[in-house]
Each structure stands twice: as C-alpha cells, then as structure tokens.
Image: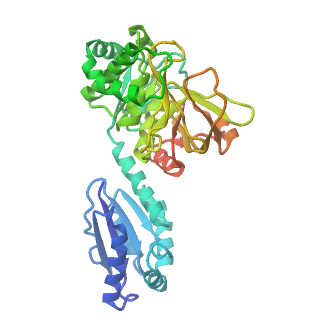
C-alpha cells in the first residue's frame, strides 16, 4: 500500500519560507520509513493533484491554520486518510512543535477531523507516531483482505454449530470461499513421500524436548500430511484453510502438526474442524500482528479464568523465538502427533472471534497465566480476560482466536470496515 504524506501550511502564518521548509524536512525524516512520497502544500497549491493511486492512504499533517479547505480537497481523492498531530511534543522536535502550535496547527487538526470523520468513509486520527504506524498497518490489512481466498476442506464438523453453512455470509465480508473435498487432501497425503515430509519431521523431532506417545512413523506420517496441506494451499493459490479434520483420522494420522506449522511458519492460516469463523478471524489477526495466531477450546472456571486448550499451537508466539514443546498424540483420538507447547506466563493477548452467521464480532484484551494441566487438548493456557462477564455474555462460538500482543483497537477498526458490528451482551 502506498502512503502519501502531505504537509499543509499557509503563508499568512509561515512568513519565513525557509523556516517552513526546514520544519517540513524535519517531519519527513521521522516518516521516511513508511512514506512513499512526502509533499509540502502551501496555500493549497498541489492539493488537487496528489498521486492518489487505488488503495493509497493520505497522511495529513496540518502545520498551520487556514488550510482546512485544502485538506478536504486532498482527502476527497483518497480511499483512506489519517490525520496526524505532528505538533504534539514528542512527535516533532521542540522548535518544530512550538512553531506549529504558534501557527494554529492544533485547532486546524480538530476542525478538519470533525468534518472528515463524518464525510470520509475511512478516516483516522493519530496522536503519536506509534498510533500512526498502527493505523497504517490496519489500513494495509484492510486493503490486503480484498479478494483473499480461504479453502473449506470438507464441511464444518457437525458439532461446530455456531458457524454459518452459507458461504455467502463470508463472501459478503469480501472473503472468497472455495470448497474442496477431503478426498483431495487424502489423495495428496497418500501420494506424499517421506522426502517431502522430511523437512517438517526434522523441525519437530529435533526441536521437541521429548516424544511421549507418537512413534517415529507417526511423526513422519504427520509430516507427510503437513506437506499435503501446504501443497493444497499452493495448488489453489489460497490464503488459508478451514479443514474438517476428524474424517481424515481414518488415514491413521492427524493434521495437527500441519495446522500448527501453517499458522507458525507461513503467511497462511489454518483452522480446525471446518471452522470458517475462526479461519477468517485468524486471517484478520495475522494481517495486523507480527506475533502468531492460535485457536483454542474454552474450559470455564468459577474464578473468572478460562483454560484454553488445543492440539495445534504455534511455537514462535512472539514471532521470534520458539517456546519449549513436546510431541504428543491427538487428545480425542489418541493417534498421530500433536504439539504440547509451554506458553509463557503473563503473556498479553488479544482474544477475538467473528461470526459469519450474525455479522458480528467480539474482541478484548486478556492475559495468559500458568495453571494445573487438565485432561483436555494438549497445549493449554489459562486466560484471564480483562472483562470475564463480557466474554461470556458475548460469546460467538466455542473456539476463541488469540494473538500474542494487544491489537484490540486495530481489530475493532478492521472488523467495522469489513461490515461487521460489535456483538452486544
């Protein structure tokens, strides 16, 4: 996504042109990491001819008063705009901030925002550089989700009753769904060689602290299934999948390792049990964060915490370093291979889920905690929601989707742009 930065100034305020240009250059230097181009617009000259390519975002930086009409003219050319309060101390050097304040940049920002938030379909306000970068990433995520494709392998499992069976519910969100048979994956698995599975086998065999139930052949079969899932995504040029995994157990293996690998080591996403709601949620999160995504089943506790568990899990939760893990069998069936990952205590989470059936979403912050292991799926993490009652009263399904940092505001904004509404208690 192209990011066009425009600095708006009026000569009636900035009498010293050299001082204005020097200040604009100082601001440009702070934004060079993400700005495609940066332009100084004085007295409106050039406001109507900015390079507004499809999908480009305009970052508006008011530097004085008397530029509101120029800002509106420029903003009308772009799909997305972000108003940036560069005059705030810390966003610019002391002298630059003082000059912009003296020249009425502050009231201009608010005046422009009051109109753009009503008139423009996608306008944001950023009060510091961190918020600006977050907003640009959210806009990039929104743009990147246009035309994406998810595979539905088989049908949603019959017990996943919260998921819509109408694929049109997801297409209305801009997500294309291609449904393929489980036989295609099964045949690809049966044809997969040990050589194709070897890279995945080596990754998990060498990285595991121990191997409890799975045999060497179990792990190799799971690795061949991983190769089959990766090949399926490539063949269909898809961005992710929701796989009805339980029928595949008849092959004598599981897709747990493959799903874990896809969510951990690729830009794709994979959701279990044909859960399209989770797959869409994971795709949204993955475009917003550099951490990994995880879907899990809840086990409610009266103390206001929930033990979330699943037999799939990423290893590099923070996007950098792998967590310790051991190899286990699949909990429900007792066959194949899955990961039991030791997730860190105190990790900050974003917890969310969308509903295709209801056209709504939930999102809130939470914190991971250590707790006693229970007889349920292999990877477990106790989660303390910021608002436990809200989680219960707005639940949209069994599976909850997590990433390992706080992107609640960004997810909230992205979901609204996709046409979803916040779920109400």
| Residue 178 in view in this figure | no
- The quarter of the rendered structure image containing the N terminus is bottom left
Q: Residue at x 44, y 47 (%)?
A: 289
Image check: 114 left or right of 204? Answer: right
- The quarter of the rendered structure image containing the C terminus is top right
Rendered image quadrant of residue 391: top right
Rendered image quadrant of residue 154: top left
Residue 62 in percent (x, y) is at 41, 75
Above or below 289: residue 298? above
Instruction: Please identify the residue farthest to the bottom as the structure is shown.
Output: 15
Residue 228 in percent (x, y) is at 30, 21
Residue 131 in percent (x, y) is at 47, 61
Above or below 45: residue 227? above
Image check: 127 left or right of 196? Answer: right
Q: Residue at x 47, y 12 (%)?
A: 335
Image check: 341 left or right of 236? Answer: right
Above or below 147: residue 127? below
Q: How many marks?
A: 0
In front of the other: 230 or 218: 218
Instruction: Please identify the residue farthest to the right as the structure is shown.
Output: 302
**Which colour style is shown?**
rainbow
Rendered image quadrant of residue 5: bottom left
Residue 381 in percent (x, y) is at 59, 34
In front of the other: 123 or 85: 85
Q: Residue at x 39, y 30 (%)?
A: 261
| Residue 306 in view in this figure | yes
């Amino acid at each position: 996504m192209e990011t066009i930065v425009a600095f708006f100034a009026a000569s009636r305020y900035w009498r010293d042109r050299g001082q204005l240009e020097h200040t604009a250059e100082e601001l440009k230097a702070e934004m060079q990491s993400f700005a495609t181009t940066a332009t100084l617009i004085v007295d409106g000259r050039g406001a109507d001819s900015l390079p507004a390519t499809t999908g480009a975002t305009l970052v508006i930086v008011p530097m004085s008063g008397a530029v509101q009409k120029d800002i509106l003219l420029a903003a009308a050319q772009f799909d997305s705009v972000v108003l940036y309060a560069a005059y705030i101390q810390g966003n610019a050097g002391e002298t630059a901030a003082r000059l912009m304040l003296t020249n009425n940049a502050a009231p201009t920002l608010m005046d422009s925002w009051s109109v753009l938030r009503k008139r423009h379909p996608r306008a944001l306000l950023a009060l510091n550089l961190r918020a600006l970068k977050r907003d640009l990433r959210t806009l990039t995520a929104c743009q990147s989700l246009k035309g994406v494709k998810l595979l539905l392998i088989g049908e949603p499992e019959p017990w996943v009753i919260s998921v819509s069976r109408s694929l049109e519910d997801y297409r209305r969100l801009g997500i294309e769904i291609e449904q393929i048979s489980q036989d295609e994956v099964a045949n690809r698995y049966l044809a997969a060689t040990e050589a194709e599975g070897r890279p995945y086998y080596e990754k998990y065999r060498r990285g595991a602290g121990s191997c409890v139930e799975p045999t060497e052949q179990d792990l190799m079969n799971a690795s061949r299934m991983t190769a089959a899932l990766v090949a399926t995504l490539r063949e269909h040029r898809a961005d992710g999948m929701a796989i009805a995994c339980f029928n595949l157990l008849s092959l004598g293996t599981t897709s747990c390792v493959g799903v874990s690998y896809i969510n951990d080591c690729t830009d794709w996403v994979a959701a279990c049990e044909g859960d399209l709601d989770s797959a869409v949620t994971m795709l949204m999160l993955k475009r917003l964060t550099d951490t990994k995504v995880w879907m899990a089943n809840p086990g409610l506790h009266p103390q206001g915490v929930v033990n979330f568990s699943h037999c799939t899990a990423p290893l590099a939760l923070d996007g950098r370093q792998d967590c310790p893990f051991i190899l286990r069998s699949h909990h429900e069936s007792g066959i194949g291979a899955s990961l039991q990952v030791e997730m860190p205590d105190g990790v900050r989470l974003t917890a969310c889920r969308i509903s295709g059936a209801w056209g709504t979403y939930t999102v809130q912050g939470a914190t991971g905690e250590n707790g006693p292991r229970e007889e349920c799926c292999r990877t477990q993490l106790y989660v303390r929601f910021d608002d436990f009652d809200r989680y219960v009263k707005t639940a949209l399904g069994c599976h909850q989707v997590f990433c390992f940092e706080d992107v609640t505001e960004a997810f909230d904004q992205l979901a609204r742009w996709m046409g979803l509404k916040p779920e109400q208690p």
